[in-house]
Image: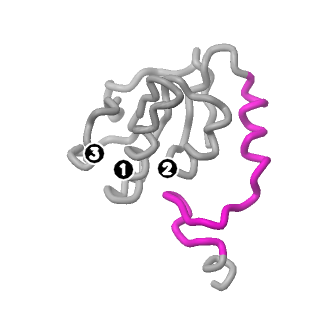
Amino acid sequence: MKLIAHIDHQYAGTGESIAVDNTTDPLSLDLGGIERVDLHFPKFNDGRAYSQAFLIRRRLGFKGEIRATGDVLIDQLVQMQRSGFDSAVLREGVDASDAQRQFERFKAFYQGDAVQTAPLFARKAA
């Protein structure tokens, strides 16, 4: 997952990127010509963007970038990646190396997810 400093983030809405409100049904989106979808976490305990990312990635088959914005906590980055996010904008003052260490904690997952759909036993059998 690509980690982006708050200061380096360019807001969506220009050209091939859109920002999706977390009350929007992602299945109603027309993603033709869109390369990046920004999904917003207004509070860390509002998980609607996880569901939106999963639906956009799996049901709509979106191949572009899905970016997490807003109240992004580093302890939620792994779940964001498993839900279909490609990148996350870190809050101001968050150390990117601390955030990157989250991905080193878990080497594999038993269950399938939005990115790796097959469970671990099926991947090992293949």
Q: Does the residue at mark 3 contact the one at mark 1 (Cβ under 8 Å)?
A: yes
Place of residue 41 in the rendered image (x, y in percent of width and height, measured from the top left) = 46, 28
Which secondary structure class fits the magenta region best? loop
Q: In the rendered image, which residue does mark 3 sit on?
A: 31
Considering the numbered disc 1 on the image, is that residue within a helix, a strand or a loop? helix
Place of residue 107 in the rendered image (x, y in percent of width and height, measured from the top left) = 76, 57
Residue 7 lies in the magenta-colored region: no
**Sequence-first tag of 3 and 1:** 3
**Few, some or many residues within 10 Å of mark 2 (<14, 14–19, 20+):** many
**Sequence-first tag of 1 and 2:** 1
**Few, some or many residues within 10 Å of mark 3 (<14, 14–19, 20+):** some
**Sequence-first tag of 2 and 3:** 3
Q: In the rendered image, which residue does mark 1 sit on?
A: 56
Is 51 left, or right, of 24 in this rendering?
Answer: right
Is 124 left, or right, of 58 in this rendering?
Answer: right
* Number of the label disc, if any, that sits on residue 98: none
Q: Does the residue at mark 1 contact the one at mark 2 (Cβ under 8 Å)?
A: yes
Q: CA distance from mark 1 to mark 2?
A: 8 Å
Place of residue 54 in the rendered image (x, y in percent of width and height, measured from the top left) = 42, 51
Based on the displayed image, in which of its 4 quarters is residue 49 positioned? Answer: top left
Considering the numbered disc 2 on the image, is that residue within a helix, a strand or a loop? loop
Q: What residue sits 63% from the left and 76% below the top?
A: 123
Residue numbers of the magenta segment: 95-120
Q: In the rendered image, which residue does mark 2 sit on?
A: 84
Q: What residue sits 71% from the left and 61% below the top?
A: 108
Q: The disc labelled 3 sits on which kind of residue? A: Leu
* Number of numbered discs overlaid on the protein picture: 3
Q: Closer to the observer: label 2 or label 3?
A: 2
Place of residue 10 in the rendered image (x, y in percent of width and height, measured from the top left) = 47, 21
Asked if residue 24 is positioned above or below residue 114 in the image, the reply reads above
